[in-house]
């Protein structure tokens, strides 16, 4: 049977993954994540002025109104995104009036306020969602692969898939830590949605490979487990790549034409889909091979 010896280079795959993950982990330790008001609580005010303004001047005018602004992010067309402690609509109106005296007509494009209690609760639930999803994936895959012949164990298939998807989560979170430090990109509720979507996609891709391994085990009794995995990856590689490419093309279109609101959500999905495709083939399968061979 013709197949490419994927598992022969498993340590090379692990080394490449390590090189990708380490910068993100270092960034997380040093800089953490730049959290939006969804998590920290506060007010997000987006305005458009008639004439250009300097962020420092906006902060000074707000300070005169007893409004503490954390950051001002300018955009084209004299649009400014103000992130501050929680303020009321009345305080926002007063600030716009003062800005209008200096920079002409001020148009409010967005006003969002999130309390600190809700922000803390969302943070806890986000972590819980990822943990619960991982646990249920292990349980589901262990049940789905219960027909795996002895001496192989079904729960190792599930655990290997979860380790691979955790790699994808770390890659995305680490890269966004770098984005937050260098490009001031904030993590919001949409980012958590992207992470959970990435988890689902990564597991789906891994299941395609693992299911073929399960089917080939009784068909290839004279072959080593490593050879069976190599053959299974060879059989499913085109399907995995084609599926991922269609998703990547769709997301690229959204990135180009979808607008500012969902830009970083789409970027997170793109990074996660590419990482998920890689890890399902070059991380999940080698982890399973090492684990099963260790107990032979």
Image (cartoon, rainbow, N blue to C red):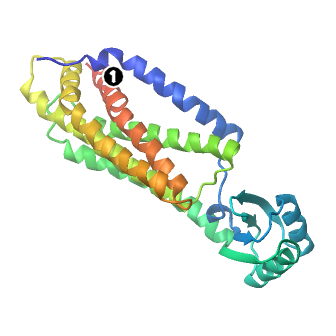
Q: Quadrant of residue 238?
A: top left
Give the vertical position of 207 relative to 266 (above or below). above
Give the vertical position of 59 relative to 90 (above or below). above
Residue at the extreme right of the image, as rendered: 64
Residue at x 57% of width, y 40% of height: 175
Give the vertical position of 31 relative to 111 (above or below). above
Q: Residues within 10 Å of mark 1 (few under 14, many from 20)?
A: some
The residue nearer to you, when weighing 203 against 249, is 249
Residue at the extreme bottom of the image, as rendered: 90
Secondary element type, mark 1 = helix
Left or right, 225 with reference to 50: left
Q: Quadrant of residue 10?
A: top left
The residue nearer to you, when weighing 97 against 206, is 97
Give the vertical position of 296 relative to 196 (above or below). above
Residue at x 86% of width, y 70% of height: 62
Residue at x 35% of width, y 43% of height: 202
**Residue 223 percent across, percent down from the top left:** 14, 17
Quadrant, the N terminus: top left
Left or right, 170 with reference to 133: right
Left or right, 229 with reference to 96: left
**Total count of labels:** 1
**Residue 169 percent across, percent down from the top left:** 48, 43
In this rendering, does residue 130 appear at all?
no
In this rendering, does residue 65 appear at all?
yes
- Per the image, the residue denoted by label 1 is 290
The residue nearer to you, when weighing 112 against 135, is 112
**Residue 159 percent across, percent down from the top left:** 35, 38
**Residue 270 percent across, percent down from the top left:** 44, 45
Residue at x 58% of width, y 29% of height: 22
């Amino acid at each position: 049977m013709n197949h490419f010896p994927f598992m022969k280079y498993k340590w090379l795959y692990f080394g490449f993954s390590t090189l990708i993950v380490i910068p993100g982990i270092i960034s997380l330790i040093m800089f953490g994540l730049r959290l939006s008001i969804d998590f920290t609580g506060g007010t997000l005010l987006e305005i458009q002025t008639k004439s250009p303004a300097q962020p420092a001047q906006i902060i000074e005018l707000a300070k005169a109104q007893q409004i503490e602004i954390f950051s001002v992010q300018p955009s084209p067309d004299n649009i400014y995104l103000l992130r501050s402690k929680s303020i009321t609509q009345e305080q926002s109106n007063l600030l716009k009036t003062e800005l209008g005296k200096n920079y002409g007509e001020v148009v409010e494009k967005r006003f969002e306020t999130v309390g600190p209690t809700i922000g803390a609760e969302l943070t806890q639930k986000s972590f819980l969602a990822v943990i619960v999803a991982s646990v249920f994936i292990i349980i589901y895959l262990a049940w789905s692969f219960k027909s795996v012949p002895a001496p192989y164990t079904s729960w190792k298939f599930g655990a290997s898939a979860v380790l691979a998807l955790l790699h994808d989560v770390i890659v995305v979170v680490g890269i966004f830590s770098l984005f937050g430090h260098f490009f001031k990109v904030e993590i919001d509720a949409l980012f958590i949605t992207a992470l959970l979507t990435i988890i689902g996609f990564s597991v789906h891709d891994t299941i395609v490979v693992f299911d073929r391994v399960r089917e080939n085990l009784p068909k290839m009794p004279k072959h080593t487990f490593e050879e069976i995995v190599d053959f299974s990856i060879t059989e499913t590689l085109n399907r995995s790549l084609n599926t991922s490419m269609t998703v990547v093309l769709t997301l690229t279109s959204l990135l180009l034409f979808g607008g500012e609101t969902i830009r970083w959500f789409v970027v997170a999905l793109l990074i996660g889909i590419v990482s998920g495709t890689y890890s399902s083939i070059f991380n999940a399968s080698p982890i399973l091979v090492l684990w099963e061979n260790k107990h032979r």
